Amino acid sequence: MGSYILRRMVSAVAVMAMVGIFVFLLTRLAPGDPAAVMAGRNATAEIIAGIREQLGLNEPLPVQFLHWLSSILHGDFGTSIFSGRSVLELLGQRLEPTVSLALLTLALSVTVGVSFGILAAWRAGGLVDRLLQVFSALGYSIPVFVIGYFLVYLLAIHTAWLPVQGYVPIGEGFGGWFSHLILPTVTLSVPYIAYVARVARASMLEVLTEDYMRTAAAKGASSYAMLFHHALKNAGVPILTVIGLSFAYLIGGVVLTETVFNIPGIGRLVVDAINNRDYPIIQSVLILTSGLYVLINLAVDLAYTLIDPRIRY
């Protein structure tokens, strides 16, 4: 186990090194010049050249990369080109809305998706199973922003049950915080519920046909014991894998959802940074989210042994 963790840590470092190179080149080679955007439309070539010199954009790419990498390793993610404020400070201000939306989405997706998948597998071929298959096909194929606009019209504009957009910090009251997150959470959860439910159903169906499940039924085991004590535990590995992989999709979904519902989170910050060619913010967000994704994958791999003791590394 210890050697496996060490190998995974080494591979994680290698992955993050490749991600760092890719992120740096992606932002530098993308169309657009931040110096020209900062200078404005009427700026002269001399003004633009001065801004590029001030930002260090005239240095060779390898030199820029080494400076950026050295700063990252020392915990300095740079300063926003346009606001002049620390990137970590800006991320800290936008962290609460994004984390709140992500955690609520994961909780709702896992709870509803696994429950629907178990129920559909237990009643395979029935009405619930057929409805789940239709919902999974639609939920996983319709774009998130389309679901968002539909829910806004139905629950915010047409019925006025929920706020249309915006965010209220939890420190200002749980009710306002929760009510503003219902629509974006449901919007972002629909494709993940569909994805998790389909995998849970397939895994449970495979386990329910095993010989030991028939033996448990012959011994008089209750439906609850068969589903949750025997079947779900043995079907948990693929379900846990899907939950871990869903984090990558969640990152992109948060950006779209925060834009649709005007939530001042990290997603909106990234969109504004891309429009302004604000390299430090874009690079920092990509590096931090990539590192978090690598850690989640490592945690999922280690959690396999808790679900299935037969797994050894």
Image (cartoon, grey):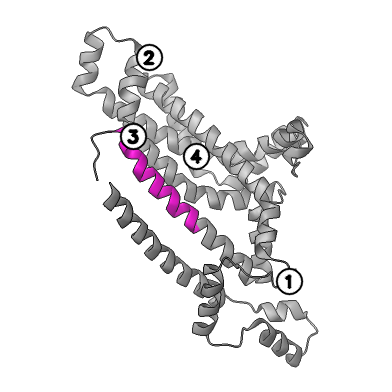
- Given the current orientation, which residue lies at the most extreme bottom position? 46
Q: Is residue 225 above or below residue 59?
A: above
Q: Which mark is residue 224?
A: 2
Decide if residue 199 is on the left or right side of residue 258: left
Q: Type of residue at label 2? A: Tyr
Magenta range: 290-308
Percent from the top left, x then y, of residue 266?
Answer: 64, 54
| Nearer to us: label 1 or label 3 | 3
Tell me how far mark 1 sits from mark 4, CA to CA: 36 Å
Q: Are marks 1 and 3 in contact (CB under 8 Å)?
A: no
Mark 1 falls on what kind of element? loop
Q: Which mark is residue 306?
A: 3
- Of mark 2 and mark 4, the one earlier in the sequence is 4
Q: Are marks 1 and 4 in contact (CB under 8 Å)?
A: no
Majority SS type along the magenta span: helix
Q: Are marks 3 and 2 in contact (CB under 8 Å)?
A: no
